[in-house]
């Protein structure tokens, strides 16, 4: 079945870096757009970033623009989020999600990976 | 950026009740709206897309309506597994913003 599994979360100091991964299975990864969404502790959902199927188009929330980079490797069925210059407010559960091609609906979500930014 | 506002922020209801949750966009988004359900400690699940289209596998007691700026999610007869937090999300333009969530609790 369609499955997304995130990894790479952990504890990092402010100003540090982390790379999240999302392994996809059960669908033709290269046909779909993908997104990262995060949820701070006890808070709502915040869209973070989006990448087209061929990586030709990316978009970012203002809160992470210039610090985070989304990428994908279709040969490895994998999605990535490189996070630099991390701040305390980046602390959250990060979800990857399969995204519809022509509209930004997230129709399959992973279970999430937790990122904690603290000294 | 488009802002999404849900009401109420929380609601208490009983099994079998009919419940309606409202979502308002700060500007018109046609029918580019989704609804998600999230249970504690779990990932969100897509329920409704394009304002009123039921995602595959979602029970028919869930329905969505609206267009422009005002949208509703209705659960016709609450089941025990429906107690969760519900989020709307606009898909009209970037960034794809979510509402703040509506927590549906057992009365």
Image (tube, coloured by chain):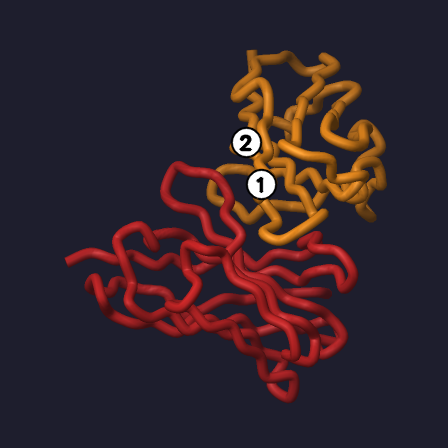
| Chain letter of the residue beneath label 2 in the structure image | B
* Image depth: mark 2 or mark 1 in front: 1
In this view of the protein, which residue sits in the foreground, A18 or B40? A18
Q: Secondary structure at mark 1?
A: loop
Disc number for residue B101:
2
> Residue sitting at 20 percent across and 56 percent down?
A118
Disc number for residue A92:
none
Quadrant housing residue B4? top right
Residue that numbered label 1 is attached to: B98
Q: Colour of chain B?
A: orange
> Residue sitting at 63 percent across and 38 percent down?
B37
Give the x, y percent position of residue A19.
39, 74
Distance from disc 2 to disc 1, alpha carbons, whole Å, reads 8 Å
> Residue sitting at 79 percent across and 37 percent down?
B51
Q: Colour of chain A?
A: red
| The C terminus of chain B lies in quadrant | top right
């Amino acid at each position: 079945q369609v499955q997304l599994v995130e990894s790479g979360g952990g504890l990092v100091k402010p100003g540090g870096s982390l790379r999240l991964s999302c392994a996809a299975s059960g669908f033709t990864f290269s046909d779909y757009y993908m997104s990262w969404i995060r949820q701070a502790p006890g808070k709502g959902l915040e869209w973070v970033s989006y990448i087209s199927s061929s990586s030709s188009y990316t978009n970012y929330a203002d809160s992470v623009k210039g610090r985070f980079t989304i990428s994908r490797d279709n040969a490895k069925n994998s999605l990535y989020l490189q996070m630099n210059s991390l701040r305390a407010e980046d602390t959250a559960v990060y979800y990857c999600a399969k995204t519809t091609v022509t509209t930004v609906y997230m129709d399959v979500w992973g279970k999430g990976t937790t990122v904690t930014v603290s000294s | 950026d488009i802002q999404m506002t849900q009401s109420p922020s929380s609601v208490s209801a009983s099994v079998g009740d009919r419940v309606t949750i409202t979502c308002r966009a700060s500007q018109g988004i046609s029918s580019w709206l989704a609804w998600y359900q999230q249970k504690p400690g779990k990932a969100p699940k897509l329920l409704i897309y394009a304002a009123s289209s039921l995602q595959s596998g979602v029970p028919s007691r869930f329905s969505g309506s609206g267009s422009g700026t005002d949208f509703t999610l209705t659960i016709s007869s609450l089941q025990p597994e429906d107690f969760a937090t519900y989020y709307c999300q606009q898909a009209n333009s970037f960034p794809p913003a979510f509402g703040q969530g509506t927590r549906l609790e057992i009365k």
